[in-house]
Image (cartoon, coloured by chain):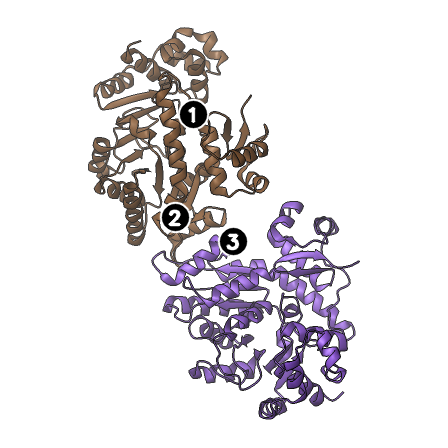
Chain colours: A purple, B brown
Amino acid sequence: MPAHAESEALLRLLQSGAPASALRRLLDSHGTACAALAAGSRDWASHGLRATCHAAIRNPEPQQLAHAMRWLDDPAHHLLGWRDAAYPPLLQRIPTPPAMLFVAGDPALLWLPAVAIVGSRAATAGGCANAAQFATALAKANLCITSGMAAGIDAAAHTAALDAGGVTVAVLGTGPDIAYPSRHRPLRDRIAAHGAVVSEHPPGTGPLRQHFPSRNRILAGLSLGTVVIEAAEQSGALISARLAAEAGREVFALPGSIHNPMARGCHRLIREGAQLVASPDEVLEVLAPLAADLAHALRGSLEASCGAAQTTLPEPSLGDAAYNLLWQALGHDPTGMDALVERTGLTTAEVSSMLLALELNGRIAAEHGRYARIGR
Amino acid sequence: MPAHAESEALLRLLQSGAPASALRRLLDSHGTACAALAAGSRDWASHGLRATCHAAIRNPEPQQLAHAMRWLDDPAHHLLGWRDAAYPPLLQRIPTPPAMLFVAGDPALLWLPAVAIVGSRAATAGGCANAAQFATALAKANLCITSGMAAGIDAAAHTAALDAGGVTVAVLGTGPDIAYPSRHRPLRDRIAAHGAVVSEHPPGTGPLRQHFPSRNRILAGLSLGTVVIEAAEQSGALISARLAAEAGREVFALPGSIHNPMARGCHRLIREGAQLVASPDEVLEVLAPLAADLAHALRGSLEASCGAAQTTLPEPSLGDAAYNLLWQALGHDPTGMDALVERTGLTTAEVSSMLLALELNGRIAAEHGRYARIGR
């Protein structure tokens, strides 16, 4: 089917205001948005779409639709649906993946092993320097630097990654065409030109308070781990960190002086189990094996049929003994990381790495940071 | 028996150079040092004392002995033997308690709930200010502040505790009469006058490198918990912290900037399981229930016969359900804190507090941070 028609169908589904979970189920049932649109009211209702959504699908708001379609005319702009082969594999595995993603830039970059660097908008100069130091070193180690393009830590991380010649991805709470704060327009354009700017909201969507926490789940979901540089006691960065932990990803936090209020959020995370890191090498030590497994899994996926939404991997690249140990420790009831570490006697890093490989292989499912065998 | 004769007998045993473990066994067998001295070579040998020690006991170096006895003539100076009713109860419970303790000041202060505040001799000004802040607040909360009277963090903690009108105890690696560094003479005298200066080495013993690590076990052993304020990657404070953990005591560490080399030791401790604390209240929250249990146990001990070396407590002051849960989780094989927390579903703080009560009650034994039921 023509890409144009599929994009328009996806946009009509999105504009209906139906929740992402219902839209994902609809796309899973029908394979394409065009087929989902053709299925009609009874089918939509059976997938949990309410009557108001049906009306909106049939009569989409024409200006919004036209605006989004014009935005997609640019060859650098993309709309990835839930069943699209290009949908980022790590994002598929979070508890609530978005039904579609708008991308300004190269969508292939969303498949790279990535680390989120996040923190306070009101960061100290020292915090911004630390963000730049970590982003530079991790970008040079071939990790994609993801962040939220906010003031403070986020902007420092994106800028340093770009300056280092690395790859960076911004996940926005606005439409992908909006720079927020507006002084970040040049930064947004630079990220779109050399990396990717990502949003689940259609072009033209302004900064709405309620969109920012949900943005953080995408940021955490695209990344193997999240590094929190500076965060006050109430900070969006802490939400990113919790969502990362819930998705079974690594969480790192930088400590700071007990007199720096911007260190309090990090200290709270460390108390709650985040890994204390004082250098980029300590982050790399944990993420490098996960990145290697991800690269392996994606190679498998590229060799497999391109239409498959699930990546495939012949068998996790793990020693048989450890792999069997973990497989025995996993049941069909979701089991937390702590219990798996306890049952296997392996380290958290080993278990994390093996779980990711099993997940990417489609052998297990992760939900809310708990793991269970799938079917067979 | 006259105190003078018992002190001289203890000193002769100590001067023999026999290890503390052998001397403790000898005192356990005979009750007093006088009786132990009277027992003779065959008995000494059966307790592990070598022939060179026998000779030294029979012919003590007269000048050393006279110097120590003269020091003990001062009514403010004391020698507490292993079987002495005044021997500090928490110190009894470490893996390797000293066979005797020299005390300049009030030995009763060694029974107070105490917290060790330790750190680098080369602390930053900020670190010393933090030490003073914690010592002031914890001393005002009626905890005795123990430290090692070294430069830097130790001196800042002692001084702040004295200035706050609190109680402070210095544990020395030299004899109790020596100020090291020598500029700490006024500080030593102030601590001896208002608190206590403690050492396992006889008066006149100078600063010997090998005595300082073993000094740290006494410091940790007298205290319910140890707070490390600033420590380089190789620091005596880390030894204190490990010995505290091995003795089943709480370990706290203050985080700092990732660029402060004096924060590295603290960060390492936090990674290894020490509790990250950013305020004295966070220390108090953990130690207050332990201090209450200790006070309860010591009340029991004072009511019991004064000759008993073991404190007694009618029954741990704990809810029956939680107490039974922990008792079932404890076996006769030593079990680590993590396993007890896992088995009981209680928090670490709850388990710590209950273990201390059980220990003080003589129901369980702690060794190297592992716990086991005793006998019955």
**Chain of the residue displaying label 3:** A
Q: Residues within 10 Å of mark 2 (few under 14, many from 20)?
A: few
Residue occupying the point 49% across, 35% down:
B319
Dot label at residue A273: 3
Q: Residues within 10 Å of mark 1 (few under 14, many from 20)?
A: many
| Residue B242 location (% of width, % of height) | 46, 40
Residue A338 to residue A87: above or below: above
| Residue B170 location (% of width, % of height) | 30, 34
User: Residue at label 2?
Assistant: B282
Q: Amino acid at mark 3?
A: Gly
User: Residue at label 1?
Assistant: B313
Residue B376 to residue A254: above or below: above
Dot 1: what SS? loop
Residue mark closest to the camera, 3 vs 2:
2
**Chain of the residue displaying label 1:** B
Residue occupying the point 46% across, 84% down:
A185
Answer yes or no: are tags 1 and 3 on the same subunit: no
Which quadrant of the figure has residue A287?
bottom right
Q: Sequence-wise, which precedes: disc 2 or disc 1?
A: 2
Q: Nearer the viewer, residue A20 or B348?
A: A20
Q: Nearer the viewer, residue B89 or A318?
A: B89
Residue occupying the point 76% across, 60% down:
A315
Asked if residue B217 lies left or right of residue A359, the reply is left
Q: Are marks 1 and 3 in contact (CB under 8 Å)?
A: no
* Mark pair 1, 3: CA separation: 36 Å
* Image quadrant containing the N terminus of chain B: top left
Which quadrant of the figure has residue B167?
top left
